[in-house]
Image: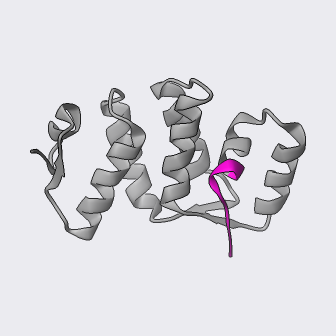
Amino acid sequence: MRAVDTNVLVRLVTRDEPRQAAAAEAFVANGAWVPQLALAEATWVLTAVYGLDASAIATAVDMLLNHKDLTLQESEVVANALARFRKRPTLGFSDCLMLEIARKAGHLPLGTFDRNLARLEGAERL
């Protein structure tokens, strides 16, 4: 299966460059794999560059998670991170994803200096 980079995900979400959006759709049409790193980077770009708020980020992740042609790496981990992010939108999606990756791998607690992240079960403030 093919894999996609961050910028392909951004084009699928924003559709701000019609030619690139069409090329992205054509590339994934027969199925494509989305690494968690590309997803985390995409949410950062959508926040930092495009100014999307937490609600819009959650919608974008949900759209990618349910895209008919995409297979997200460990989609259940992504779904758990999305659910956690929707409950605590002040956290970044990537923080929620990191915690869920650590949880699935059995490597808790997740040490952090982030006060908000440390409030979540499985995280520990240092």
Give me the residue at 28% from left, 65% from top. 104
Instruction: Say which quadrant the C terminus sits in.
Output: top left
Residue 75 location (% of width, % of height): 47, 60
Q: Residue 34, position in %: x, y?
A: 59, 61
80, above or below 73, in the image: above
Residue visible at 83% across and 37% down in the picture? 17
The quadrant of the picture occupied by the N terminus is: bottom right
Q: Is residue 113 left or right of residue 91?
A: left
Check the image and name the residue furthest to the right: 19
Q: Which residues are magenta?
A: 1-8
Left or right of 118? Residue 36 is: right
Q: Residue at x 28, y 52 (%)?
A: 99
- Left or right of residue 64, residue 88 in this image: left
Residue 25 percent location from the top left of the image: 80, 53
Looking at the image, is 1 positioned above or below residue 109? below
Identify which residue is drawn at 65% across, 60% down: 70
Residue 77, horizontal then vertical, whole percent: 38, 58
Q: How is the image coloured?
A: one colour
Q: Quadrant of residue 69?
A: bottom right
> In the picture shown, does residue 113 fall above or below 79?
above
The number of numbered discs placed on residues in the rendered structure image is 0
